[in-house]
Amino acid sequence: MLPRPRRGDPLWIWLLHGWDVFSWAIIGLLTLATLLGDVPAGDRYGSLALLAVLALGYAAVRRGQRNTVRLASGYLVVLIVVVGLLSWLRDGFGVLYTVTLSQFVIFANTPRSAIVHSGLGALAITLGGSLRQGWGVDSLATNATSSVAVYAVGVVMALVTPRALAVRDERARLRRRLADAEQQLVEAQKRQGAAEERERIAREIHDTLAQGFASIVVLAEAARAGLAAEPAKSAQQLQSIERTARENLAEARVLVGAAPRDGVAAGSVATTLRRTLDRFVEDTGLTVEAELPDVDCDQPTRIALLRCTQESLANVRKHAAASTVGVVLTAGPEGIELEITDDGKGFVPGPAARGATDDGSAGDGGRDGAVPAGGFGLGGMRRRLAEFGGELTVTSSPGDGTRILVTVPVPVPVPVPVPEPVPVTAAVGAVADRPLLDVPSADGSPSGGSPADVSPTTGTATDGQV
């Protein structure tokens, strides 16, 4: 039994059901004509009774909740009998076969069933009409010709309808598959967004909070060790601990959204980097030679350069065992370059050694100069620069120090040259007796460091270092 059409069904299904509705409109008109017309009493009551039986059978099938296939088959038998009797009882009522032809397709369970039942209907009206007109070859041939012509239309309908239903079902399957694909795409985008956000937060924590906590630990150990022998230096180290803790608090507020997202105060990139270098000198006592001309760039680029500088200095502090660090900032028509060099022990750039630790530090494998692959060190720097189309180049070899070159392709005006770069220098143990380039602040200064009397002992700036 063909269900009622729904949105998205082919036009043929709608036409078929429209024909069914139209057939009952014609049956209603015939019933009205029978009631009001000049019809003999026997023919009138017989016609009305047959039409009533047909209407009741149709209503039973449409309202049936169980065994609808059996009800539909029974209704088709009733339809065949009614059209045959009406064609025998009334002149011209054989047209009901044409009017109700769509019902043989709608209520049939298979195309074969539709063809068989519609053929039986054609036979019924042929016999009924021939009996009413008087049995003979001529009447039989005339009725058979018209019945076969209508039956041919019914066969075409029975064959076309399954194809239309197949198209409908295929469209329904495609719509479901499309809906499933869209849902999967939405879920994949959510997962990708969550993964990217986790990576961003991990990178920001590594570049800020983790370095700051490492600095606090080292400074606290040094202050405790020298509390009795060098109270003045210990007091200075305690001040550095307090300042670093405040900076970490500010960075934590940035990460949870309670402060501006960049976490870096406005200003030129040169000023920002000078503050970072001042803190590095204060915490380590190393010599820093800096060339930092004023370079105009947007805020995201300035933050990227600052984070790269912080990461490089943190790796020098923890791994390079260097005495001097050089920082050179240059700009040209093609973009900005930041070069950070040290005279430390260097390393062999390459895959992680077997003893690399989970946090990306060298561990046992770092003793031969290999670069571990884990962590968020140089790998995080590369990912950050990739957002701007920038590149990170690492050059190093054992015993020859390390050179890190950051390139950001941002067109900027050529800066006004500085007459004479002034190196930032400090002797180990004499940090408290010399002025710094600038007052350290919490606007993007590097987190992390070691006290003036603590010598770095491991590694150098490595890809993936913490």
Image: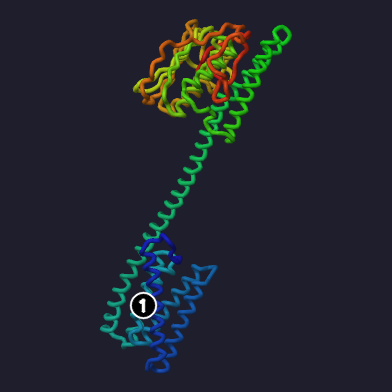
Q: Residues within 10 Å of mark 1 (few under 14, many from 20)?
A: many
49 or 371: nearer the eye? 371
Side (left or right) of 434 relative to 163: right
280 or 82: nearer the eye? 280
Vertical placement of residue 413 versus 291, above or below: below
Q: Which residue is mark 1?
A: 97
Q: How many marks?
A: 1
Percent coordinates x, y for residue 375 in the rendering = 55, 22
Q: Quadrant of residue 12?
A: bottom left
* Furthest residue toward right: 228
Percent coordinates x, y for residue 395 in the rendering = 44, 13
Q: Is residue 358 visible?
A: no
Dot 1 amino acid type: Tyr
Vertical placement of residue 112 versus 249, above or below: below
Residue at point 46%, 45% (across, down): 181
Residue at point 45%, 79% (across, down): 54
Q: Is residue 150 visible?
A: yes
Residue at point 46%, 25% (across, down): 302
Side (left or right) of 110 relative to 444: left
Side (left or right) of 257 relative to 387: right
Callout 1: helix, strand or loop?
helix
Q: Quadrant of residue 148?
A: bottom left
The quadrant of the image that shows the C terminus is top right
119 or 378: nearer the eye? 378
Percent coordinates x, y for residue 171 in the rendering = 40, 55
